[in-house]
Amino acid sequence: MRKSAILAVSLLALPLTACLTPARDFHGYIPDEVQPYDIKPGEDTRSSVTAQLGSPSTKGLFDTNTWFYISDVQERLAFYKPKVAERVITAIRFSEDDKVDEVLRYTQEDGQVISYAARETSTRGRELGLWEQIFGTVGSVRLPNTDEATPGNPTGRQGQ
């Protein structure tokens, strides 16, 4: 009796273990054979970097001589919001003669939290409450238009 109870409880608890294992999602640049930080400054050029790593995730906004390869891994446990488990940004800066000048690697620990300004311009107009959304159309019944054309009044005009 006791063994069957333990077996039944363990079989019932088995599906719950799937909720305890985080699901991993990979975003951005996923290196195949060559890692971005394996690029050698002074030796590699723009074309060799493109051949080895492919096109960058993004280029510098003000300095197009800097390429960024961005990748991150997010883990999600059950229904909770995903959390970034690992983030790597590799910045490759080129000199004027298209040779790699330097390779910089940033991780999640190097990042900074940027606080955005809370000032917003509202664009939706007046916000409706729950009850206004549900009962907002009650009482606003449209009456039929009397200017419609009917068989006895083909123009739809009232008394000329």
Image: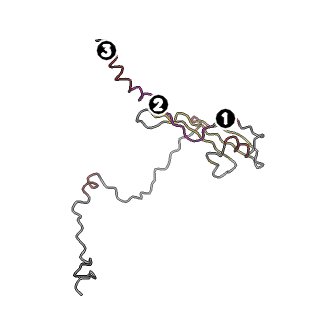
The residue labelled by disc 2 is 22
Tell me the residue at 50%/45% (across/down): 115
Mark 2 Cα-neighbour bin, 10 Å: few <14, some 14–19, many ≥20: some
Dot label at residue 135: none
- Disc 3 marks which amino acid? Ser
Where does the image place residue 53, in percent across and percent down from the top left?
67, 41
Figure quadrant of residue 31 = top right
In the shown orientation, is residue 2 left or right of residue 102? Answer: left
Q: Is 72 located above or below residue 96 in the figure?
A: above
Tell me the residue at 27%/55% (across/down): 132
The residue labelled by disc 3 is 4
Figure quadrant of residue 86 = top right
Q: Are marks 2 and 3 in contact (CB under 8 Å)?
A: no
Secondary-structure class at tag 3? helix
The residue labelled by disc 1 is 33
| Count of all numbered marks drawn on residues in the image | 3
